[in-house]
Amino acid sequence: MASINERKAFRLSVIFILLIAVIACMIISLIWGSTPVSLAEIWRTLWADELTDTASQIIWNIRLPRNIVAALVGACLAVSGAILQAVMKNPLADPQIVGVSSGAGLAGVIVLILFPGYDYIVPLVAFLGAMGAALMVYALAWKNGVRPSRIILAGVAVAAFLGSGISALLVFYGDRVQGALLWMVGGLSARSWPQVEVLFPYAMIGLFLACLGAKRLTILSLGDETAKGLGLKVEQTRFMMTAVAALLAAGAVSIAGLIGFVGLVIPHMLRLIIGNDYAYLLPGSALLGAFVLVVSDTVGRVLMSPIEIPVGIIMAFFGAPFFLYLLRRDS
Amino acid sequence: MSTNNSAIAVKQLSVTLGNRHILHDISVSIPVGKVTTLIGPNGCGKSTLLRSMIGYISSPSECVTIFDKPLSSYSQNKLARQMAFLPQVPNMPKDMTVEELVYCGRYPYQNWWKNTAKEDREIVDYALSITKTDHLRHQLIPSLSGGERQRVWIAMALAQEPKLLVLDEPTTYLDINHQLEIMELLKRLNKEQGLTVLMVLHDLTQAVQYSDYMAVIKAGHLIAAGDTKDITSDSLFKEVFSVDVQVDNFDNKPYVRVKGLL
């Protein structure tokens, strides 16, 4: 029993703690690695005009941009998942499970293999692919309205279908797969400032639009009929927010490849803590997603150093059991 | 408020879903400032009629007018400020408090460029007190009883400041005490606030007892429509429901006694 203001204060403090956690884990991630650096060196590097020693080069050219990419990718995937769960009325929705990531992946691979040299349009094409996949899932699942189980089944089918397209391209163009394969693996190694520059605008626009639509998602969660009665344009909201989710997923996939389960696990953990009000859930998911991906990537970097475990593998390792847990709990 | 105007008017409405004809050429007008009930046996099309009247099932645009303007001339948002609709079984938000849910009723009035906090709070407080849910304010929706939950949904609808409240079988799944509690609440809102109420009911006795105006539907046809005391008769209900009823009069008001099957 708590008043609206107490509940708001609690949610805001959770978000604030998450913000601190993201900053803390990014700093720790700068320190840890095959070549340890000190806090003092980090401080000096951040304010230095030029990179004089090895430590500052590692910090500025390798760890910091990779950190930022990890945080942005985590935020994008988590928010994308939270939005998809709302518009698809399905707690198990996630950009990878419902095929949105595969759509972005196939579109990206087509560009990389068939039109090499046009790398810079990959995020845009990936967005179109992601949106196309989302619409395909809707079309397949639509029969007098969407039902949660049908969405997942349609999503699995679409993901498999598009995945086979990716595999076919990789097989037919064996001589050109090098770039595409690196991109497909789903990791953050060798991601640096150019990737930050590509991802940053997509992430910011996507996260901004997501927060603008947060209230609508909360109203939508009351059910289509009630939402309509409250003056919400239900189908229009659904379409627009699906587009935002596709944009976020496409941005993340273009840079980090197919990383699964972030969009599934993160919003759920947060729903348990701060509830389903999307005005808090979306920013909270962005921060928790950033935190988890930075931590996972750091662990993957450090655990078996100098061998790196791709962050996609770590997420799947922890995410898949969580998915099964949700499946059992909801049924 | 004039009672000659209609809150909702339907002209020659026919509805076909798939290849089933659900409604045949229905013309009816719901009076402003009264409690109106759509009644008829299961599957007669009363729910479809209700949904067509408020745009939840699309119908030819010239068929329906709300407060004497074509339904199609309303934006979804403008409609939400005139009319509130409660579906039969609304989704239950798992982790909202009563207060938060009732605040959702203010959604049609909220804009990012306008601070409506003070006005919102006053209206939410009013909606909670008139539905006697004030003491539940900080409770989570799933912890409420069925009757309390229904009153809270009505409070959310009232936060929309509607002139017209539309309900689809508001007393389903409630025990008799809570059924009457909801009916008394609606009656009171109508009397004290001048709220126009339109609902679908399946309980004949309650429909006659609590509504000023009735539209009786059977197999997609409008059988009768008019003031309750004018149209209530043994023969009408025998024809529509195929049960043996007797209409008595107390205090100049009709009461229906259902005696058994015909």
Image (spheres, coloured by chain):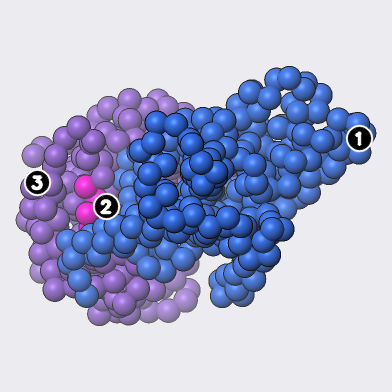
Chain colours: A blue, B purple
Residue B20 horizontal/vertical position (percent): 62, 45
Magenta: main secondary structure equals helix
A139 horizontally vs A80: left or right: right
Residue B90 quadrant: bottom left
Q: Which numbered tag is attached to residue B235?
A: none
> Of discs 1 and 2, which sits in the foreground?
1
Q: Is residue A109 visible?
A: yes
As drawn, the residue found furthest toward the front would be A53
Q: As shown in the figure, which amino acid type bears the numbered disc 3?
A: Glu
Q: In the rendered view of the protein, which quadrant contains the C terminus of chain A?
A: bottom right
Which callout, 2 or 3, points at the residue further toward the start of the chain?
2
Residue tagged 2: B104
User: Considering only vertical position in the picture, is B70 above or below A304?
Assistant: above
The residue lying toward the viewer, choosing from B24 and B153, is B153
- Tell me: A112 left or right of A173: left
Which label is found at residue B119?
Answer: 3
Nearest to the observer: residue A215 or residue A121: A121
- Chain letter of the residue carrying label 1: A
Residue labelled with disc 1: A174
Please state the chain letter of the residue tagged with numbered disc 2 in the rendered image.
Answer: B
Cα distance between the residues tagged 2 and 3: 14 Å
Residue A318 within the magenta-colored segment of the rendering:
no
Q: Which residues are magenta?
A: B102-106
Side of A76 relative to B120 (left or right): right
Badge 2 density bin: few <14, some 14–19, many ≥20, Cα 10 Å = many
Q: How many marks?
A: 3
CA distance separating discs 3 and 1: 66 Å
For residue A170, side relative to residue A187 (left or right): right
